[in-house]
Amino acid sequence: GCRLWHYATEKDAIEECRGLSNGMAKKHGVYNTGFRGAKLVVPINDVSKIHKKNLMEDVADVLNSVGGGGAVYTGCDLNITLDDMDHLMAKTPFVLASVGSDTDPNVATAYGVVGSLLGAFEARNLPVQGTRLFVLGCGAVGSEVSKIMASMGAHVLTSDLDASKADIAGCTNVSEEIAANDGRWFDVPCDVFCPCACSRIVTKEAIHKLSSNGCKLLCGASNLPFRCEGAYEDACRLGVEFIPEAVTSAGAVIVDSVEFYANAQFIKCVPLELYHFTRHLTRSKTLEIMR
């Protein structure tokens, strides 16, 4: 994917790009997609001021030149939309973003997260009905996860910096309470925490507070969710079980591989069939690693 984000320094952008690339390689390895994994990161001070069409032309130049073209493919990530992919496709063929299909890679990612949640619930004998699931970040992925889990009977708590995005039928929007509490999202009591926001949000303080409030599982869409290795180590020590994003957040890479290797069938496929296929794979893989 191609990520457009603000970083304090160029070093921070490079480090995140390396971490995300390693994460993508793990996703592809877990699901044996035939790809190796990479990430494009574009550091920008003010996302709202970027000229997207010009940016897509620059991205196309990179894709067309690396390895003579075809060594790297890209798709959507933070602040990059399907409309941007349409512009990119006019300049390069090295795009995997469900262009020309009704399948939405964001929805595929959401179904993958749901599959992992269901697998984790089954592995740990947690009922879906009534379990407190806190979804942080209600963009294209988080909102879909929230809708699906609420429809299954989970007690879904939602939050987003744009509080209106967290107004989802069947869910409890806690955005305003978090904003009034200096943004301390980790004070929200939950059984399962599902991060669907930006990277590196889970600090040591956050994991300690989540644990003290009853959280037992961390399973979401965010890549690189932990701020530091110490936060992950504390999660293990405190009994907050983490399902790696290489397993949970692989819906887009799964459907991308179908798009690449069986494009004619992919274009004709009913999207819901691909979503359910993705959910089946992530549920099965989650059960495998938790048993």
Image (tube, rainbow, N blue to C red):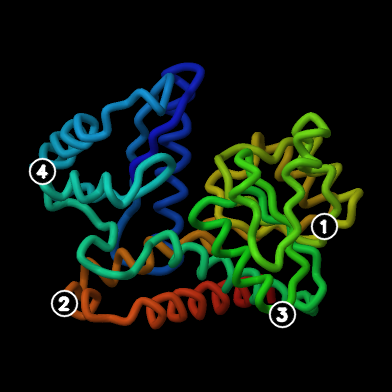
Counting residues from the start of the chain, the first of labels 3 and 1 encountered is 3
Counting residues from the start of the chain, the first of labels 2 and 1 encountered is 1
- Quadrant (top left/top right/bottom left/bottom right) for the C terminus: bottom right
Q: Give the residue at mark 4.
A: 91
Residue in front for this viewpoint, 56 or 162: 162
Q: Is residue 39 above or below residue 52?
A: below
Question: Is label 1 in a helix, a strand or a loop?
Answer: loop
Amino acid type, mark 2: Ala
Residue 57's quadrant in the figure? top left
Q: Give the residue at mark 2.
A: 264
- Farthest residue to the right: give it: 212
Do the residues under discs 4 and 3 have CB atoms within 8 angstroms?
Answer: no
Counting residues from the start of the chain, the first of labels 3 and 2 encountered is 3
Label 1 environment density (alpha carbons within 10 Å; few <14, some 14–19, many ≥20): many
Amino acid type, mark 1: Cys
Q: CA distance from mark 3 to mark 2?
A: 36 Å
Q: CA distance from mark 4 to mark 3?
A: 46 Å
- Marks 4 and 3: which is nearer the front? 4
Label 4 environment density (alpha carbons within 10 Å; few <14, some 14–19, many ≥20): some
Residue 190's tag is: 1
Counting residues from the start of the chain, the first of labels 4 and 1 encountered is 4
Q: CA distance from mark 3 to mark 1?
A: 18 Å
